[in-house]
Amino acid sequence: MKVKKLKTPLGTKDIENLVSSDMVNLSGTIIGARDQAHKRIIAGLEANKNIPIKLNDEIIFYLGPSPAPPHKTSGSIGPTTSARMDNLTEPMLKAGVAALIGKGKRADSIKTLLKKYKSVYFICPGGIAAYLSTKVKKIKTIAYQDLGPEALYELEVKDFPLIVAYDVHGGDIFSP
């Protein structure tokens, strides 16, 4: 199977050309955010306040980072379970998020939302967090430092391995 090479930001055509089960190597800038960061971003959006990042065309990675060892760019960095974000997803998509990265199956409602907002859900293999760290060229905390590992991160990645789990056409890697 051929691996598709994509660069951020993803355009509409990039997203529409993806089909569930496609393998992708992603390069560029992505945003790392988990539950608590999502809650703060959504609270800011709902209150019409400035938030620390632009969401339009961004890719959100539900990540579990660990501290970088000496002389390394990143510590182990793996995906966290995406289903925990299901109730926080629509405001992010409505704000223009182009893609989500995590692991595992999501609620059926997420597939509907991805079609509605023309976004895609990638899965990143679990259990290879040390390997994934070699694909991170730069990582920095950009907001919500008080949240520790749940802070908001900006990552620059090169050939980050992903699989399209849900596409904009209703395709679903988890359905037979």
Image: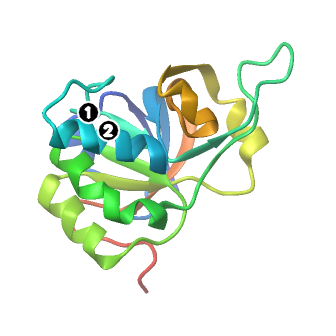
Question: On residue 55, which mark appears?
Answer: 1
- The residue most toward the top is 71
**CB atoms at circles 1 and 2 under 8 Å apart?**
yes
- Kind of residue indicated by mark 1: Leu
| Above or below: residue 13 compared with residue 135 | below
Residue at 17 percent across and 43 percent down: it is 46
- Kind of residue indicated by mark 2: Ile
Of marks 1 and 2, which one's residue comes earlier in the chain?
Answer: 2
Q: Where is residue 101 in the image (x, y as percent from the top left)?
A: 46, 49
Which residue in the structure is indicated by mark 2?
Answer: 41
Question: On residue 9, which mark appears?
Answer: none
What SS does tag 2 mark? Answer: helix
| Crowding at mark 1 (Cα within 10 Å: few <14, some 14-19, many 20+) | some
Q: Where is residue 4 in the image (x, y as percent from the top left)?
A: 44, 43
Residue 98 visible in this rendered orientation of the protein:
no
Nearest the eye: 164 or 96:
96
Q: Position of residue 109 (x, y in %)?
A: 26, 74
Q: Is residue 85 rendered to the left or right of residue 170?
A: right
